[in-house]
Image (tube, rainbow, N blue to C red):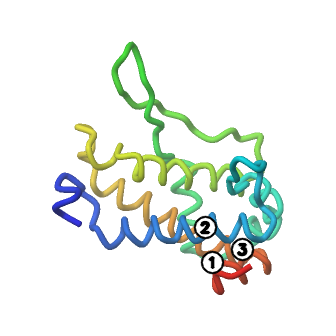
Amino acid sequence: MRRTFPNMLLPPEIAYEFLGTFARCEYALKGSGFARGNENSVDANWDAFAISIDQSFQTLGEPEFREAIDYLLTEPPRKQVLNNGRIGWKESPPDKNLPQAQQVLLMVRRVRNNLFHGAKIWSPENSNRERDIKLVKAGLLVMKHCVNLSDEVCMAYKVGVF
């Protein structure tokens, strides 16, 4: 993996686990009814899933989980933007009016976007390794817990068959 991503500051095994878990979550969401689209395309509906689990999400008291949520909400990943023809970064905290699970899963998707679309591999601003690792680990922990908050999603995630 180092030859493919020579500038990646994240440990490859963390990046690989995050991307694999994210992909399995999307597959499980779509297969358990949290999907939107038509005959031309389909996407996982993370927002509908987040709303459906929000009550359980808020009462889950495991300290590590709560710390991950707090980090994603208080130190959210920035959003890559185009400003005057140049790629840059923008602070983009979640909308506090949304349910907490929806806010957090939006930040998890942003971590994924920043990692998968190359912003955390090729960007010259990829120097905050500790922060990036902490964001990826927090997102990974959140995804693994959220899957277990829906029986249908959990089954699809574990079995991989719908």
Check contact, mark 1 vs mark 2: CB within 8 A: yes
Q: CA distance from mark 2 to mark 3?
A: 8 Å
Residue at label 1?
62
Depth check, front residue: 30 or 15: 30
Check contact, mark 2 vs mark 3: CB within 8 A: yes
Q: Where is 117 relative to 67, above or below? A: above
Q: CA distance from mark 1 to mark 2?
A: 6 Å
Where residue 109 appears, as percent x and y from the top left, is 56, 52
Please identify the quadrant where the N terminus is shown.
Answer: bottom left
Where residue 48 appears, as percent x and y from the top left, is 79, 55
Identity of the residue drawn at 57% across and 50% down: 107
- Choose top left, top right, bottom left or bottom right for residue 150: bottom right
> Crowding at label 2, few (<14), some or many (≥20) Cα neighbours within 10 Å?
some
| Numbered mark located on residue 21 in the image | none
Identity of the residue drawn at 42% across and 47% down: 114
Task: Assign a secondary structure to mark 2.
Answer: helix
Where residue 17 appears, as percent x and y from the top left, is 42, 72
Identity of the residue drawn at 28% across and 49% down: 121
Residue at label 3?
60
Q: In this image, 120 relative to 113: left or right?
A: left
Identity of the residue drawn at 63% across and 54% down: 104
Check contact, mark 1 vs mark 3: CB within 8 A: yes
Please identify the quadrant where the C terminus is shown.
Answer: bottom right
